[in-house]
Image: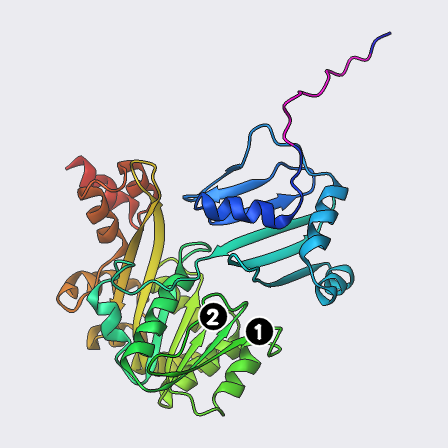
Amino acid sequence: MSDTNPPPPQDLLPVLGSVDDYLRFCMEYDASDLHLATGAQPVWRRYGNLQPIWDNAALLTPEDARRLAYGFLGEAQIKQLESRGDVDFAYSPNYGRFRASVVQQRLGIDMVFRVIKTQIKSVEELGLPPTAKTLTRFHNGLILVTGPVGCGKSTTLAALVDSINEEREDHIITLEDPIEYIIEPKGCHVNQREVHTHTASFAAALRGALREDPDVIMVGEMRDLETISLAITAAETGHLVLGTLHTGSAARTLDRVLDVFPIDQRDQIRIMVSESLRGILSQQLVPKIDGNGRVMALEVLVNTPAVGNCIREGKTYMLGGVMQTGKGVGMVTMDDALRNLYATGQISREECEFRAEDKVMMKKYFES
């Protein structure tokens, strides 16, 4: 009896020799992420879409994935992967920089790489409004850059910090996991610290930073109570603090910040945030209508007396209305940003409706 399995196609593309071979392809074709997973084809993310690099590529066997992983990991990273099951770090070969994550899973090893654009773009190149640069000219307070994973928060933050670097003669400390953009000193003295390499955690790094005579502190992630509390205290005591959160709008950002605190502390924290907050930039990247890349939709909140009052009284649900009336000081709601992109022919109606905060009002806008 003959074998019933069909013969493998003759043109099946074999697994490449190294991680570097795949990463060079990603850089050449402007992909933002690379996925090399056991039991799957090599996959990349281009313009926000996850897809196989080649339709006829062979699936990675457990042996392939292990060979690729062990080919680029250092001795200490291999030990951590084997003992803890995962390792995250910045991978810096001579042709680029990447945020690497390697994990053990049911089938074998998975690797994910984020391509880090080594050239810091300016505020102007990113198309950020003048309001963004105005926020960086404060010498104390809190600036938050928010949005989902992969929406360019790190790129925006690097542009804001580099703008300060050009305009001032201050001490900048960045706390990152991992260090992405290398910020060369211009007018400022710059220290960059990597969590898990130079320090145990964001909170520990932030506590240490406050003893190092900083003027500006950039916090890569504000996730837990201690980090958020220290950031607010630093902003109140005369430092300019820039941080990120994975929230989708200004109102949700403030809710997230306040909700991490115990109920008995929230009144006091609301007062502190209402006084120290300078502004919130909430961003998302939306696929362009021509399929050629993505464009940023940006919500801008500037702390005015009306905004401060909403925060103090816990009425963050009123911020949308306050932002509508605050256009004169540079405020923009996410829905207005999306409508502007649609009106200028950059994004589709479907994307505009799908990403809207107030879907009912957006629907009415299109039907009117």
Q: Amino acid at mark 2?
A: Gly
Whole-percent x and y of residue 46? 45, 43
Q: Amino acid at mark 1?
A: Val
Asked if residue 10 is among those painted magenta in the image, a careful observer would answer yes
Asked if residue 151 is among those painted magenta in the image, a careful observer would answer no
Q: Is residue 116 above or below residue 212?
A: above
* Quadrant housing residue 40: top right
Bounds of the magenta segment: 3-13
Residue carrying label 2: 220
* Quadrant housing residue 256: bottom left
Task: Identify which residue, 83 or 89, lies in the foreground.
Answer: 89
Task: Identify which residue, 150 or 278, lies in the foreground.
Answer: 150
Instruction: Using the image, tell me which numbered label, if any, was put on residue 195.
Output: 1
What's the image's color scheme? Answer: rainbow
Query: Which residue is depicted at the point 40% across and 57% down?
Result: 152
Relative placement, left or right, of 307 versus 177 is left
Query: Which residue is depicted at the point 51% across and 58% down?
Result: 96
Query: Which residue is depicted at the point 67% across and 20% down?
Result: 9
Mark 1 neighbour class, 10 Å CA radius: few under 14, some 14 to 19, many 20 or more:
some
Relative placement, left or right, of 73 versus 337 is right
Give the SS element for disc 1. Answer: loop
Total labels: the figure holds 2
* Quadrant housing residue 300: bottom left
Whole-percent x and y of residue 76? 73, 67
Quadrant of the frame with the N terminus: top right
Q: Earlier in the sequence, mark 2 or mark 1?
A: 1
Query: Which residue is depicted at the point 53% across and 48% down?
Result: 24
For this orientation, the residue located farthest to the right is: 1
- Marks 1 and 2: in contact by CB < 8 Å? yes
